[in-house]
Amino acid sequence: MLPLEGKVAAITGGTSGIGACTAEVFIANGAKVVIAGRRQDRGEKLARKLGDAISFIRTDVACESDVKAMIDHAVDRFGRLDCLMNNAGRGSQNAAIADVDLEQFDAAITVHLRAVLAGMKYAVRVMAAQGTGSIINVASVNGIRAGLGGHYYSAAKAASIHLTRCAAMELGEKGIRVNSISPGMIATGAFAKFMGMQPDEADDHPEYAEAAIGAVVAKWQPLQSVGRTDDIAQAALFLASDASRFVTGQNLVVDGGISAGWPIAAVRSDRDLFFRTIQASLSARFA
């Protein structure tokens, strides 16, 4: 029996990148999937590709009524809802504190936090009646380590991680598990979109992001490979399946080790300089 046999999942931000890859992995493992996103042409194209096990609904997660309609669509189309993956997002924006644009901050909070809460609000009503369910909130390594992402994005993702824990404490008694995944640098179109590339072109060429990540990976993470969407999809598969039946309130970090500390390749020369300086000081003292 496949891990998600008989299960139904809804994935926001499901028309590209991590969301689209996760939809494919879920379907390959037996699930029926609703993908939600704003780009209708792209969503319908993916639905045609993956067949009867998938259904697309145009959804703007900033609009609460759209989120409710997505959950209703999943139940109407497939009869139940076993997993909600809150994955929709927008790129990180850099701004100094003195120059912040509070409207842009509000927009980041709306997509990365308010939409997560909205998704849970409507999914819980279905899952509680079933007595079971898994909610997966896609956060970011920027939510647990400062200095890599912009202030708006990082703060929103940190809040999403804590909201996940809070929800898990409430919903456990209803049989609903709530966890987050914090990706590190994953080769998706998000980076090229941030640099001004059109969304469809950026999503069709993840190799641009892969090249950029590859240029800095030795300094930033101990594992020297570039993260790909399937790395996150496989983590989501675990959290959606009964293999994680005893896991809730957790933040599963999939980042190649970025959040664990500085890789030895990045600090070796500094560490050597540190000890040489100490040795020189001691030698001067006892000369």
Image (spheres, rainbow, N blue to C red):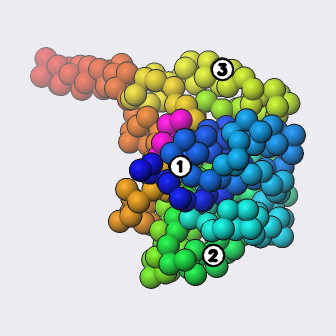
x and y percentages locating residue 262 in the rendered image: 40, 33
x and y percentages locating residue 184 in the rendered image: 53, 39
The quarter holding residue 72 reads: bottom right
Note whether 285 is above or below 255 in the view shown: above
Q: How far is mark 1 from mark 2, CA to CA? A: 20 Å
Callout 1 crowding tier (Cα within 10 Å): few <14, some 14–19, many ≥20: some
Name the residue tied to disc 1.
30
Q: Amino acid at mark 3?
A: Glu
Residue drawn at point x = 17 percent, y = 19 percent: 283
Residue drawn at point x = 50 percent, y = 78 percent: 131
Q: How far is mark 3 from mark 2, CA to CA? A: 39 Å
* Region rendered in magenta: 230-235
Callout 3 crowding tier (Cα within 10 Å): few <14, some 14–19, many ≥20: some
x and y percentages locating residue 49 in the rendered image: 73, 35
Residue drawn at point x = 86 percent, y = 45 percent: 40
Name the residue tied to disc 2.
126
The stretch drawn in magenta includes residue 217? no
- Observer-side mark, 1 or 2, equals 1
Name the residue tied to disc 3.
207
